[in-house]
Amino acid sequence: MRIYATVFIFVFLTFQTSAQTDEGLKLIKLHNTLHLTRVNSDSIAGYQIYVLLQNTDTNLLVSNINLNGANIIQLKTLAEFYTLNAIYQRRCGNSTDLEYFAKARLFVQHCDKEFFLLKDSIVLKALDNDCGINAETVYALDQYLQKTAYATRGIKIDVAPVYNSMPQFPFPPPRCSDYYVLPENFYKDFFTIGDLNSKLTKCLDQNGYQVKKYYSIPKGYAVVTQLEQLDERGEPKNIPYRWDTRLNPLENFSIYSYIRALFFAEKGYYRFLVFMVSAANPQEWDSKKITRSQLPEGAAMLDKFVSKIKYTDDYKVYVMIYEYEHVETEDAPTLLIPGKFSGANFMNSKLWKNLTY
Amino acid sequence: MELPVNICKRKLASVWFLGAAILFLLVFLQTIFGKYGAKDADVWAWALQTIMPTLTLIVSVLLIDSHQNPAKSKKVDSFYFRTSLYFSYAYFFIVLLTILLQPIALSYGQITPLELIKKSGLWLGPLQGLTAGAVGIFFVKGKS
């Protein structure tokens, strides 16, 4: 109720302060300034943001913008917002140009307990579709929030963004068999980290990794591949055995394979890859050993907002290899540290070549 | 129809010695090559439990016979002999199959060798009872 009341009061106040005709130009200028500023995507951890935007018209539509589409909703559902939410006024009667000049103010709600009204206004320009607010706007808000929060409230904001809908990948990352950083020639022509993801997924697709899961990590995201079975040379097995995690000593039946399976313990080698796209250099590892099944179910796609975050030179792709050996006499697979097949073997793989050339 | 008891005993003992030797050799090689890892003691316990009771009976009777003066003309009903023999064949066939089918059970049934050995009590238990009974009766009936 307290939230509703505050928001209603705020809507009322913004109604009373309609913008001037020349405000549009002013807004554009301010917006551009913000847009050129580098945006730290990890600035609003633990906070829910509610944005009120007002355009120069008095027609008001209240909408929930959750970056998944423009769902026009009633203000009463505000409490249901979990990630970034924005409430804005849309200028009616001029929907063709899809250009909105808006005056915004921010609320930061911390852990559903305390409600701040940041004193300054921010002016935004939303250029996209009915959503009325685009990624650039969000960057600007993000930047503004960071500055304002630090400046006016002393709020420490430095962890993962709440507007990220992807589940969290353990961080610091659990110990892996080996890890590599993709070399410089991978990072070409990226404007956003979504562009980076496009190149990454293309390479993964080319190597048969059709199913990928996305996780949130500080200052970036992680892409996790399916658990795959390797042959004795460390190469992924052929379909369908590649994705079959069961031991199968007789997949190519022969007298030799039978005798071998009769007298020797069958071993299966498995691995999954984690591509950590992050501006945060992981300098420590969690000693806890994990298996693929212990990870939460990841998102099928990269979060729409995260994909729009501007790429900078700070972003690196860390390829972490989790390699396991499962012997038929043991109940659970063992994480191999260091890996049996990583190292030179992985560097010579087709995947690595795709990524680095 | 009656058969010479000594010949029957030796034939039956030969079946058991041969079967036990094959089983011993298989498990021995598997142990040497690390098939069962740290759990090889479980497999040896199973193997010895599978053959030793009946084999001990056979060896004991043969040893007793060797210290006595056997009546060469002693005969035994062929029914007892054939029953014991066929049960012994069947028993060793199933015991060895339990070992030899391990790769197939793992590939197609995802049953590990140790699981298969533990499960084998289901079918080997009754068969072992019947076989030991038949062999025991034969040796007692044909006691020189």
Image (tube, coloured by chain):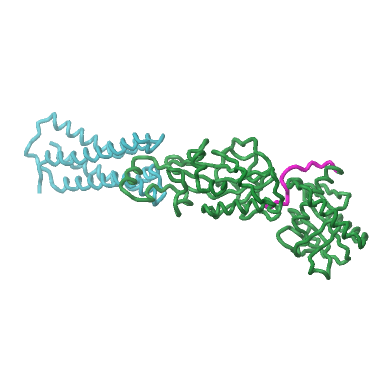
Chain colours: A green, B cyan
Query: Residue A13 at what x, y percent from top left?
Result: 91, 58
- Give left or right: position of B133 versus A312: left
A82 is higher (above) or lower (below) than B23: below
Query: Residue A108 at what x, y percent from top left?
Result: 81, 49
User: For the point 78% across and 55% down, which residue is it?
Assistant: A137
A75 is higher (above) or lower (below) than B21: below
Q: A351 or B102, which lies in front?
A: A351
Residue A319: name its quadrant: top right
User: Which residue appears farthest toward the left when viewing the image?
Assistant: B73
Q: Is residue A4 visible?
A: no
Q: Which quadrant would the N terminus of chain A be assigned to in this image?
A: bottom right
Please tell me whether residue A285 belongs to the stretch shown in magenta: no
A73 is higher (above) or lower (below) than B83: below
- Give left or right: position of A174 versus B25: right
Q: Is residue A55 visible?
A: yes
- Give the dominant element type of the magenta stretch: helix, strand or loop: loop
Q: B102 or A185, which lies in front?
A: A185
The region drawn magenta spans: A153-165
A118 is higher (above) or lower (below) than A21: above
Residue B135: name its quadrant: top left
Query: Residue A43 at what x, y percent from top left?
Result: 76, 45
Q: B116 or A25, which lies in front?
A: A25
